[in-house]
Amino acid sequence: MPRRDPSPTLEGTTLLVCVGAMKAATSWLWARLRETPGVAASPLEEVRFFDARFPRMPLMDVDLLARRRLDFHLRRPGNPIENLRARPAFRASVDRVRMIYDDETYLAPFASLARPGTRVLVHVAPAYAVIGRQGFAFMREHCARRGLALKVLFVMREPVGRLLSHMRFQAQIDPLGDGPALLRDPAIMARSDYRATLEDLDATFPARGCAAPAPRDAGREGLRAALRHSGWRRRAAAATSA
């Protein structure tokens, strides 16, 4: 029996994927886009689908993280079935675990959130900055086969400040870790190598398929730039969501 595509209603929709950089206000951007009419973002800030398939210089096992996140929801107080029905993040966590063995599940969380007025889907995952050309090509083809208009957004931050912020973040995870050793860790340093990411993006996507606003602009103008790149229009979104 042929496998059913779980996201037939998304054809013609724009998928805006923010691929980094890490510690460059991508969480702020995800939160603001979730509040925008006509935009649907996964309840999980980072779905981490494409880097699970192309784990170049990973900082963690993202599939193990997905299983632990689902376990967290299963152990929360209350009836698990009622919690599943009431909590979008719980349902999205189930979908993320299914992505371990079924690529077709990737768009399921978006299909469940999309409404007739939805024009843009948002997926934020700074780890994608290092998935390389093969990873970006897989992303492009995966979306094209499902009729999605893919737009990739790469938000850059001044690299030294980004690296220091990243090192502080790692210190919170491992307070006893060797901070200077992070400067010799290829996986850490790759996240500040904007040139490599930009070259991979330029080699994979057409000129208008990728935007790289630099420097970091975590304000209204940064949000407007992301929306313009996605093709979102205020009047169209207001009309379809009314």
Image (tube, rainbow, N blue to C red):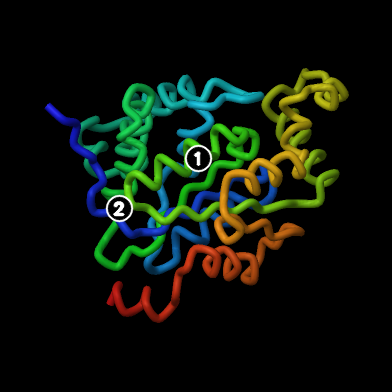
* Relative to 154, 179 lies left or right: right
Task: Identify the element where label 1 is drawn.
Answer: loop
- Residue 128 lies, in percent from the top left, at 58, 38
Q: Residue at 26%, 37% (x, y): give it.
A: 83
- Residue 182 lies, in percent from the top left, at 81, 25
**What is the number of the mark on residue 171?**
none
Q: Residues within 10 Å of mark 1 (few under 14, many from 20)?
A: some
Q: Residue at 46%, 33% (x, y): give it.
A: 49
Per the image, the residue denoted by label 2 is 113
- The disc labelled 1 sits on which kind of residue? Glu
Give yes or no for contact between labels 2 and 1 (Cβ–Cβ under 8 Å).
no
Q: Is residue 29 above or below residue 90?
A: below
Q: Marks 2/1: CA distance?
A: 16 Å
Per the image, the residue denoted by label 1 is 46
Q: Quadrant of the C terminus?
A: bottom left
- The disc labelled 2 sits on which kind of residue? Leu
* Relative to 70, 201 lies left or right: right
Q: Quadrant of the N terminus?
A: top left
Q: Residue furthest right?
A: 180
Give the image quarter of residue 169.
Answer: top right
Q: Is residue 144 above or below residue 14?
A: above
